[in-house]
Amino acid sequence: QVQLVESGGGLVQPGGSLRLSCAASGFTFSSYAMSWYRQASGKEREFAATIAPAGGFTNYVNSVKGRFTISRDNAKKTVYLQMNNLKPEDTAVYYCNARGMGYYSGTDYWGNGTLVTVSS
């Protein structure tokens, strides 16, 4: 059974930091690109960050570049999102996504999300 379980969300003041985690199970984690998406209330889900299966390539939406860092530990089957200098506009539900590469192309999994609220 495929599972992506996000954790680490919460309430933080502007300028603060949070570290999100996404624990994966039920699929070949090291063959999947992992991404974080986010969805603010009343808005569409948007891409935030991605990391290649081996971790050698990362990409970010412009609004988080220089503040967020995505990383992964294939031995632990976990992907992380370190978020620094948080702003109120970062408030959203953050979702973990796994997208199959190569042999696993066409498979796509989502977690249930974790809420991040940036407010004073």
Image (cartoon, rainbow, N blue to C red):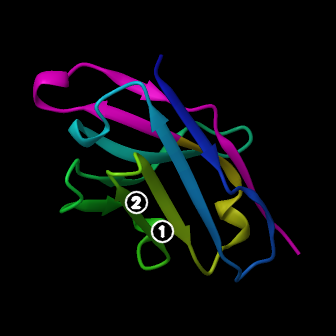
- Residue behind mark 2: 61
Q: Which one is in front, 113 or 45? A: 113
**Residue 56, image x, y percentages:** 18, 62
Residue 82 as seen in the image, left or right of residue 42: left
The type of residue carrying mark 1 is Val
- Residue behind mark 1: 64
Q: Secondary structure at mark 2?
A: loop
**Residue 86, image x, y percentages:** 65, 74
**102 part of magenta stretch:** yes
Residue 56's tag is none
Q: Secondary structure at mark 1?
A: helix
**Residue 75, image x, y percentages:** 33, 51
Q: Residue at x 63, y 31 (%)?
A: 112
**CB atoms at circles 1 and 2 under 8 Å apart?**
yes
Q: Residues within 10 Å of mark 1 (few under 14, many from 20)?
A: some
Q: For the residues marked 1 and 2, what is the alpha-carbon distance in whole angstroms?
A: 6 Å
Q: Residue at x 71, y 57 (%)?
A: 91
Q: Which one is in front, 16 or 89? A: 16
